[in-house]
Structures are given as structure tokens and as C-alpha cells.
Image (tube, grey):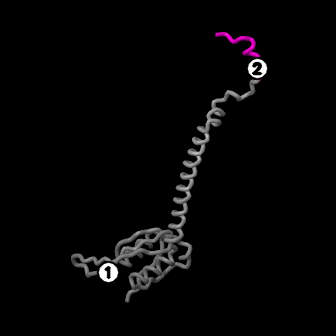
Amino acid sequence: MLMQDSEIKFVAKYYRRGAFSAKDGWRRMGIASFASRRLGIVASISALVVLAAAALAVYRAHSFGNEAIYEDVTVVGENVDAEICRTIEFTDASLDVVVAEIEGVYGVDIENVPDDAADIRLTLRYDGSAAGLIGIINEIEGTAMSVAEE
């Protein structure tokens, strides 16, 4: 079917660039705006989830960074006197905070704490006695601390 001259003149007279754009057509019918809104809603929800996760990570790092978590455990074995042991955990805590917690939790005194204890950071979880924990910290950090004899 060939177009008549009058039809060609009509199209040429009223043609504007983009007038027959599918995207504009969908937009005029209100369909594209829904898809755009849906994409915006999905992006907003994703951003909120990421921000909430980041906020939780920052909160956890700052709120629990220097706290110790411990429980009483009694260990009894062959040829071993009953010894009170603890489960103790630190996340990015300075050595001076760790030493203070060990002294408080285990009821001992720690000797030979290095002068730069505030600059040494530890993240650890330990189940056992104060002497064993101090021994592990000495191995990790190259210190010479010890539990004072009573």
C-alpha cells in the first residue's frame, strides 16, 4: 500500500522528532512512570538495607570493642587441681583494657605489663586460666607478662 501525496504532506507537516517514540508513548500512558517508580523503590530499599547493615557494623564495633565476655567453667582433670577457668573475649581492645579485665575476672595481678600497652590492640576469644591466657598474649605480642604469685 503506497501512501498518497496528501498523506505524505500531512505526515511531513505534523512530524516532530521523537513524536513516535515508544518510550514517550509508554510514559504518556502512565506505564513507564510505574516502572520507574518501582525501580526507584527497589533502589531505595536496597540503599536502606546497606545503610542499616553499615550502621549495625559500626555500632557493634564501637559498642562492643572493649568489652569482655566471660563465663565460669570449672575444669577438673587427672593430677590437676580444680582450677577456675573462664571464657573471655575481646574485640579490638587495648592491652591495658585486656590486662585490667583479666585481673578483675580471674582475681589475679599481672606483672611486667609493657609501657605501650595502650597502643597494642587485641581481638581474641580464650577458654582457660589466667596464666594460659597471659602465655598466649606473650607469644602473640612478644611481651614478658606473668601472673603474680600469691
Q: Which mark is residue 12?
A: 2
Please name the amino acid that badge 1 sits on.
Ile
Residue 146, above or below 64: below
Front-lying residue, 15 or 148: 15
At a point 56% along the width and 73% down the height, the residue shown is 119
In the picture, the quarter occupied by the N terminus is top right
Occupied quadrant, residue 58 = bottom right
Which residue is outermost to the left?
Answer: 78
Name the residue at the front extreme.
Answer: 6
Taking the image as shown, residue 49 lies to the left or right of residue 131, namely right
Magenta extent: 1-13
Instruction: Give how far across and how far down residue 75 sits, in percent.
Output: 27, 76
User: Marks 2 and 1, Cα distance to the nearest angstrom?
Assistant: 95 Å
Lower position in the chain sequence, tag 2 or tag 1: 2
Q: In the rendered structure, which amino acid carries the disc numbered 2? A: Ala
Identify the residue at the far right of this view.
13
Disc sitting over residue 84 in the figure: 1
> What element does badge 1 sit on?
strand
Looking at the image, do the residues carrying marks 2 and 1 touch, with CB atoms under 8 Å apart?
no
